[in-house]
Image: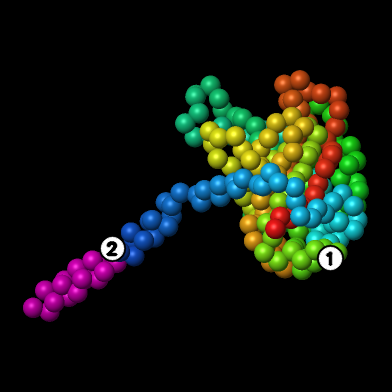
Amino acid sequence: MRRKYLNSLAACAALAAIPVMISSLSVAQAPPVAPPLPVMPPSLPPSHVVDLMTAAGSAAFGAAWKVMEAKIVEVPAVANAMPQYKTTYNTTPRAGESGFDDSSWPVIDAKDLAARRGGGHVSFLWYRAMLTIPAKVGDFDTSGAQAVLTVLVDDYAEVWVNGHMPRRSGYPSPATIQGLNMPNRVVLGTAVNAGDKFQIAIFGINGPISVAPANFVWFREAQVEFYK
């Protein structure tokens, strides 16, 4: 009788453990979080514009710009690649991702966003800054405004905000991915408040890549537009 009782207890314990096991498996096998969909920025003239390529403009957001060249590295081919492909290529560092540590990167002046960088040909540069929304910029009250980051990098740029690159496959991107010498206009927030923080990481690309141009990577424009 005692053995039968103990067997019953063991069976009950095993059944009770099943939901926990299923929950653990669900967490372990959950797909990665999809990036947020981009929001279409306004096409009307902004209420106020701040030039981030000036010391005063970047200082208004407490922004300290940092820069680092990205390198092409050989890595193992991804799973299910055709058998003849044993290796492939990636870039390092992966500086757009959430939690990336750029503490060792050199700081540059805001005006030096316009400096030509890289060695030409196939060349990549990361630019990073934390933007903190101020309560006011001059006489302009930012509370409740829509804030749009606009950057134009020669030749291309990909823009990450708070660890994500908002995009939508199969649609013309209104924000994070554009063409040759085209502005990237990224909605940071549709109703911002003082103290809101946005970690910006911009991947500057020399291109067209297949042409390997003998020029460099630099900013033509970087600003925050407010709309009310």
Q: Which secondary structure dominates the residues rendered in magenta?
A: helix
Pointer 2 residue: 18
31 w.r.t. 19: above or below: above
Percent position of residue 185, x then y: 70, 44
Inspect the magenta stretch and tell me whether residue 179 lies in it. no
Sequence-first disc among 2 and 1: 2
Q: Quadrant of residue 144?
A: bottom right
Q: Position of residue 42 (x, y in %)?
A: 67, 47
The numbered dot on residue 56 is none
Residue 15, percent from left and from top? 23, 66
Q: Which residue is located at x 55 percent, y 25 percent?
A: 85
Start-end of magenta stretch = 1-17
- Few, some or many residues within 10 Å of mark 1 (<14, 14–19, 20+): few
Q: Residue at x 53, y 33 (%)?
A: 170
**Closer to us: 213 or 57:** 57
User: Which is more foreground, mark 2 or mark 1?
Assistant: 1
Q: Distance from label 2 to label 1 (Cα)?
A: 61 Å
Residue 23 left/right relative to 139: left
Residue 11 versus residue 97 in the image, above or below: below
- In the rendered view of the protein, which quadrant contains the N terminus? bottom left
How many numbered tags mark residues here? 2
Decide which of 218, 187 is in the foreground and name it: 187
Tag 1, which secondary structure?
Answer: loop
Quarter placement of the C terminus: bottom right
Task: Please report contact status of discs 2 and 1: CB closer than 8 Å, yes or no.
Answer: no
In the rendered image, which residue does mark 1 sit on? 139
Q: Residue at x 38, y 56 (%)?
A: 25
Q: Magenta includes 11? A: yes
Q: Amino acid at mark 2?
A: Ile
- The amino acid on which the numbered mark 1 sits, given as a three-letter code, is Asp
- Residue 3 can be seen, yes or no: no
